[in-house]
Each structure stands twice: as C-alpha cells, then as structure tokens.
Image (spheres, rainbow, N blue to C red):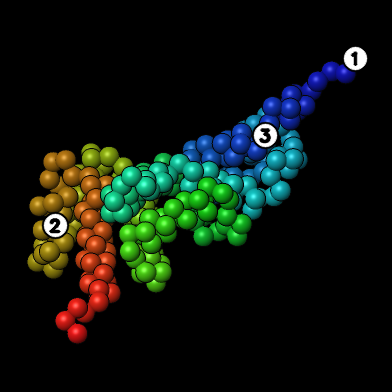
Amino acid sequence: MHRVSRDDEGHQRLNRERVLSVSIALADRTGIDSLTMRRHGEELGVEAMSLYNHVANKVDLLNGMVDAVFNEIELPSHNDDWKTAMRKRSVSFRAVLSRHPWATGLKDSGTNPGPATLRHHDRVIGTLRNAGFSIAMTAHAFSALDSYIYGFAMQEKNLPFTTEEDTAARAHIMLAQLPANEYPYLAELTADHVLKPGYNYADEFPLGLELILDGLERWLEKHKLEQEPDTER
C-alpha cells in the first residue's frame, strides 16, 4: 500500500489560488524581497518544485499576485456618477495598497496582466468615456488619478511612523532640531499642524483626491461647452 508523504499531501491540496494567497500573505508579513520559491514552499509545507505545477515561474507568480490585488479594488459602479465612482474606486485602491504595501513597486512589472487587472482598467476607462471624457482626456485623467494614488501610497509606506504617538514623538524630535530662524515655515507646519491632536497623515488623501476630481470636473465641463454647436451662427 502506497503511503502518502507530507509533500504528496501538500501537492494534493495545492491550487493556484492558494499558492497566490499564501504568497500575498508572506509578502504582507515580511516584504516582497523575502518571497523566494523555496521560502514559499516552506510556508506551504511542500518542496519548491511543487509550486511549478501552479505557477510557471517567479514572474508568473508576481503577475498573479498583482492581479489578485486588483481583484480587491472596488470597481466603479454603473449606478454612480463618474465623480462618485472614481472617488470610491480611488479610496478603495489606496486602502488595498495600504494593506499590501509591496504592491506599489510591482504595479508596472506585469507583462501579462490578468483578468482582474484588465477588468479594472476597462471599467475605469469606460466610466470616464461614458461621462464624456474624450479618449485623450481619459488617458490624462486615468494617469493623474493613479499617479496620485500610487504616489501617496509610496509616501505613506516610507514614513518613519505608523501611529499618532509615533508621529508626535518624531515631530517633537524634529522640531527640537530645527532652528526656527533658519526654517521658519517648516517649524511652523510641524508645531501648528503635525503636532496638533489627532493628526494623521492618511487624512491628507481625501483632500488631495477632491482637488484632482474637482479639476477634472471643471475640465470636462469646459470640454463639453467647447463641443456644443454655436446656435447663433
């Protein structure tokens, strides 16, 4: 009678979805640089070679992880106006990147985007096009929004503090080292804004997002006016 080994048992219960799920959890916990096929196999309790039954190679694994992350982002709803839809999508996107900070560095690495990534991009583009944005305007709007979302997420990831207490402690240290006569505005911002009770850098995101959305809305209205026929001629 054949005795099932530990590796055989791991192989039998493996599938692509579980491989990707474990890889994402590992990257969330220890960072993307720690994600080797050997370490991944150890996490799953199988030999690394068993993973190649479910992912072609490391690139395929990373592409699959990115696609899984895009699957977590709220798609723009057909029931919302474009501005509301883009706001919800942007807030969701930033929250997802906050949960998976390693993903900010992989956003452009996929040469073979998965269905969730393609579905997400198509819905964003469709929402803007249906709102009246031209093709060129859609490209510009998409770029402006995603540059802000990714940029904010990367900035947030690189901050040397994570809690309100950490922020206040580091701000006090910084303020003590700042000659106010040399850097008056930086000292003022630190003392009168960052050190205020309840300050949280994440709260900056909604304001910046509204500035972009308001600008896009004005741009769209101007574009629509320019497209209207001149009835006085």
Instruction: Measure the C-alpha gap from mark 3 to mark 1.
Output: 26 Å
Q: Is residue 166 left or right of residue 97?
A: left
Residue at the image point whose x is 33% and y is 45% from the top: 79
Number of marks in picture = 3
Q: Pick the residue in front: 150 or 183.
A: 150
Q: Is mark 2 on a helix, strand or loop?
A: helix
Q: Label 3 sits on what residue type?
A: Asn
The residue tagged 1 is: 1
Residue 124 at x, y percent in the picture: 41, 55
Foreground label between 3 and 1: 3
Residue at the image point whose x is 74% and y is 27% from the top: 12
Q: Label 2 sits on what residue type?
A: Leu
Q: Which residue lies furthest to the top in this view?
A: 1
Q: In which quarter of the image is residue 169?
A: top left
Q: Pick the residue in front: 176 or 58.
A: 58
The residue tagged 3 is: 15
